[in-house]
Image (cartoon, rainbow, N blue to C red):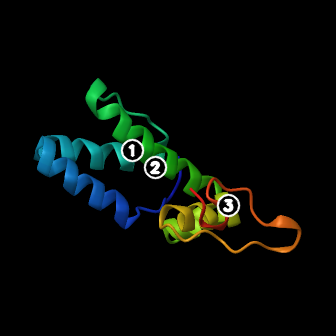
Amino acid sequence: MRESFVFYKEYHDAIQSIKEGFGEKVALQFYEAIINYGLNGIEPTFKKKYQPIWHIIKHYIDLSIKHKNPSTLQELFDKEYGKEFEIWMEILHDTPPERGQGGGYNTPCQGGEK
């Protein structure tokens, strides 16, 4: 049993969407699941349609524990993925990274080519 874990704002945002889409009862189940898993390592059993949502949240709880509870998801991503995450975010926002010495990064859209 852990004494604490980080409850990121993004968990709350996701649960608000769950509440809007599936109702308050399911949203409360997610709050309980996050707390029970974050503190006690007890994994919930959700209906099949909720499992993908849970697996994403569980992944971030596991990463935050692995990296000793970074205070933000950005800090967590930086610790887990480093420069790779920053590069892919640039790609997603259609601003490929600059090429460095020796040819630059190996990305699908180097130099803005698609």
Residue 88 against residue 32 in the figure, above or below: below
Q: Which residue corresponds to the image point at 28% horizontal and 61% vertical from the top-left?
A: 13
**Helix, strand or loop at disc 2?**
helix
Residue 44 is situated, as x and y percent measured from the top left of the image, at 37, 33
**As drawn, which residue projects farthest toward the front?**
113
Residue 76 is situated, as x and y percent measured from the top left of the image, at 57, 64
Residue designated by label 3: 84
Q: Which residue corresponds to the image point at 43% horizontal and 44% vertical from the top-left?
A: 56
Marker disc for residue 36: 1
Q: Amino acid at mark 2?
A: Gly
Q: Earlier in the sequence, mark 3 or mark 2?
A: 2
Marker disc for residue 108: none
- Density class for disc 1 (Cα within 10 Å; few <14, some 14-19, many ≥20) is some
* Depth check, front residue: 43 or 11: 11
Between marks 3 and 2, how big is the CA–CA gap?
27 Å
Residue designated by label 2: 38
Could you tell me if the residues under marks 1 and 3 are in contact, i.e. CB atoms within 8 Å? Answer: no
The C terminus, quarter of image = bottom right
- Density class for disc 2 (Cα within 10 Å; few <14, some 14-19, many ≥20) is many
Q: Amino acid at mark 1?
A: Asn
Residue 5 against residue 96 in the figure, above or below: above
Between marks 2 and 1, how big is the CA–CA gap?
6 Å
Taking the image as drawn, is residue 82 in sight? no
Between marks 1 and 3, how big is the CA–CA gap?
32 Å
